[in-house]
Image (cartoon, rainbow, N blue to C red):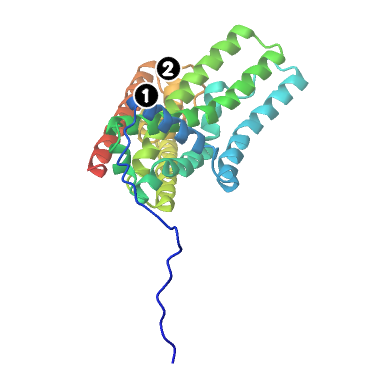
Amino acid sequence: MAVEQPLATPAGDQSRIHDIGYRGYDGPRLGRGYARLSLYSQTLRGSYGLGRSVKSKVLPMLLFAVMCVPAAIMVAVAVATKAHDLPVSYTRYAIIMQAVISLYVASQAPQAVSRDLRFKTIPLYFSRPIETADYVQAKFAALASAMFILTGAPLLVLYLGALLAKMDFAHQSKGFGQGLVSVALLSLLFSGIGLVIASITPRRGFGIAAVIAVLIISYGAVSTLQAIADSRGSAGAVPWIGLFSPVTLIGGLSAGLLGGTNTFPGDGPSHAQGVVYLLVVLGVIAAAYGLLLRRYKKVGL
């Protein structure tokens, strides 16, 4: 029968536990500003898959290429044919590519906020010096910056190509400036809408579907209603119908205030209606920011 033997203790073993306590931190405290900047940088880089897996880089980089390639082709044709103007105005290019832009927002807005909701990391952010407004501002600014890069890069390609083709410098510079203003407002508007929708659900798939539905389906519905109104002799109602879709909001603002090409049936919005479009765009952006603040104040409790 086996007999249990006590475990022998090695001779000379004098293990001790030392209570060294918690060590204080005497280094620099960078504060809220640095935390906000870090969150902005992280979100912006993540919007293009930088610092993440190769799989995460595929879609944003592909969409970026899809945005720029048509502009490069237009430039090549303009240079080869010695054209005196570009085939598409700077303010209209984003409207033509609105499906690509909508897909980018739908894919990256949930990536910016849904994972924090899903893994419940929001209270951890707010346990540090960062506050609700800092989080919302960083996320909003990062996605808007990513959107501006996406929509502004092809305009830069068009502008450089126009100068290479020796088109009128003053005319092209004015159009390029108007285009940048247009895509800046588009970036803020789409980012605000996308983040509000994505912040509702922690499920990224649901967020993507919801953003696509709001941006693309609303554009299709409003465009159909505008065509019906124009065909029935109600051309005066066409610009007002355009207020109910993010894409047509930017299109009407560009045509009414920025001298862009009209994309509506009929004559398009007047200058006064363009001012209304601008006020609505700014109002939607402000409302989106306010909704995000309210949403994350509740989540952070």
Q: Which mark is residue 134?
A: none
Q: Secondary structure at mark 2?
A: helix
Badge 1 crowding class, 10 Å Cα cut-off, few under 14, some 14 to 19, many 20 or more, is few
Foreground of the two, 7 or 80: 7
Q: Inspect this view and state whether residue 15 appears.
A: yes
Q: Position of residue 205 (x, y in %)?
A: 44, 52
Q: Return the x and y of residue 10 as percentages of the image width and height.
A: 46, 64
Q: Position of residue 137 (x, y in %)?
A: 35, 29
Left or right, 157 with reference to 129:
right
- In the image, what residue occupies the spot 42% across and 47% down? 213
Residue 123, x across and y down, in percent: 29, 43
Quarter of the picture holding the C terminus: top left
In the rendered image, which residue does mark 1 sit on?
28
Image point 36% across, 22% down: which residue? Answer: 278
Earlier in the chain: of badge 2 and badge 1, it is 1
> In terms of image quadrants, where is residue 59?
top right
**Which residue in the rendered view is the most extreme toward the top?**
170
Q: Amino acid at mark 2?
A: Leu
- Label 2 and label 1: CA atoms lie apart by 49 Å
Residue for point 44% across, 58% down: 12
Q: Residues within 10 Å of mark 2 (few under 14, many from 20)?
A: many
Asked if the residue at tag 1 contacts the one at tag 2, i.e. Cβ–Cβ closer than 8 Å, the answer is: no
Image label count: 2
Quickly name the residue at label 2: 257
Q: Nearer the viewer, residue 153 or 217?
A: 153
Q: Quadrant of residue 174?
A: top right
Nearer to us: label 2 or label 1: 1
Residue type at tag 1: Pro
